[in-house]
Image (tube, rainbow, N blue to C red):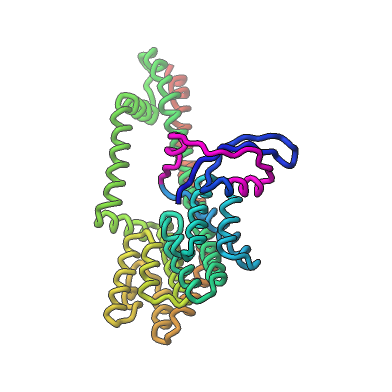
Amino acid sequence: MNIYDYRYRAKRLKDGKIVKGITEAPSKAMVEKFLIENSMKPIEIYQQKSIFQTLNRITLGSVIKERDLIFYLKQLSSLLNATVKLNEASEILATQQTNKGVRRILYGIYYEVNSGATLADAYKAYPKEFPQILIAMVGVGEQTGDLRGAIKNIIVYFDKQYRLKSSIRSTMMMPIIYLVIGFGIAIFLTLAVMPNFTSMFESSDTAEMPAITAFFIDAGDFIKGNIILIIGGMIGFGLLFRVLKKRFEPFQVFLAYISIKMPVFGTVVKLNNLSRIASTLSQMLNNHVPLQDSLATTYDTINNKIYKDLIVQAQKNVNAGEYMSAAFENHYAIEVVFQRMVSVGETTGELGPMLKSLSSFYDEDAEIKIDTLKKAIEPILMVFIFSLITVMLLAVMLPSLSFTQQL
C-alpha cells in the first residue's frame, strides 16, 4: 500500500483558527476524514513530495509499543462489540490516530482488510508490531467466527503480561538508580573535590595524607590519564557483549543460567518466564490451537535461552508421542508446582484448563514475590549506600583533621 504526504490547511472548529500541517495517508479522502476526526474543517489538501519525508518513514525497531497495542486492541474490541464492521473499524482507528508511524501501519491494516484479506493476514505484514500470539489467536477467532471473543481474550493476556513486566521493571530499576547515583557522587568527589587536598599536603613537609584519601586521588588521576582508553574499553566491551549475546549460543546459555541462579533476582526471572509460558500456552490451547503450534508461539515470546531450550525439548517430546511435561522434570529452572500441574493436565486431558489455573496462580503469586523482593532489596541497598557515603565522607574529612593534628 502506498502512503503519501499531504499538506493541508484547515479550520479548527473549537476556536475558528486556521491551521496548517503535513500528514500521511493513502488518499486525499482519508486526509479529509482524519481532519474531521480531529475536529477540523478541511479548506485545502494537496499531495507533497519530499525526500526528507521519505527518509522520515524509515524506522528502527517496533513502532507500536506494547501499551499502544493494548489500547488499539481495546478500541478495536469496543467497535466490534458495537457491531461496527471490521473494515470500517480499521478505517476509524487509522483516521483518528495522531502518531504518524502508527497511523501509517493502521492505514496498511485497513487497506488489507478492505481488500478482502483477513485481519490475521494483515497483521502478518507487520511482524515487528504484532506478536505471533496475537496473529495466531486472531486467526483462530476468524476461523471459528468468534473474532470478538478472541480479541477480548488476547487483551486480558496482554494486560496481565504488561502489568507483570512493569512491576518487574520497576523493581529492577530501583537498585540501578541507587547504584548510578551512588557511583556518580563517588566519581564527582574523586575527580573534582579530592585533588584539592594534594596541594594542601604538598605545602607541608610533616603532614601525611590519609591512605583512604590517597587511594581515591590516585584512582582519580588514573581515570583522568586514561579516560580515552577507559571509554574505548567500555564501548568495545559493550559491542563484544552484544555480539556474543546475539550470535554465540554458549554465551547465551551462560547469561541465562546466571540470571536464574542470581540471589534474589533469580526468583523474578523464574517467575517472569514460567508465568509467560503458562499464560501463553493456556491462551492458545483454550482457543483450540494445536499443542505444537502453541509451543512454537510460546517459544517466540520467551527471551531466556534456557527456557527456549526447554520449549524445544517439549516440542521434541510431543513429536515422539511423549508427555510435554517430561522436559520439565527435575530441572533447576522449573518450579515443582509448574511441572506437576502440567503433568496432571496432560494425564487427565485437561492441559488447557490446568494451565489457565497455573496462570492465575502465578498472577496472584507475582504480587507477593515481587513485594518480597522489594523488601529484600531495600536493606541491601541502604547498607551499600550508607557504606559508600561513610567511606566518601571519611576520604573528604580525614585530610582536614589529619592536617590540623600534624601541624
Q: Quadrant of residue 299?
A: bottom left
Image coordinates of residue 22 in percent, x first then y, are: 56, 38
Q: Is residue 3 above or below residue 301?
A: above
Camera-side residue: 53 or 291? 53
User: Is 386 situated above or below 270?
Assistant: above
User: Magenta residues, as a range?
Assistant: 31-60
Task: Quadrant for the C terminus, please.
Answer: top left
Residue 336 vs 227, above or below: the answer is below
Task: Indicate the quadrant where residue 67 lies.
Answer: bottom right
Residue 374 visible (yes or no): no
State yes or no: residue 44 in magenta: yes
Rendered location of residue 350, percent (x, y): 45, 83
Q: Residue furthest right?
A: 15
| Residue 277 at least partly seen | yes
Residue at x-position 30% and y-position 42%: 239
Q: In this view, does 357 lie above or below 84?
A: below
> Residue lying furthest bottom in this view?
348
Estimate the x, y position of residue 49 in percent, counting from the top left. Answer: 47, 36
On the rendered structure, is 27 left or right of 320? right
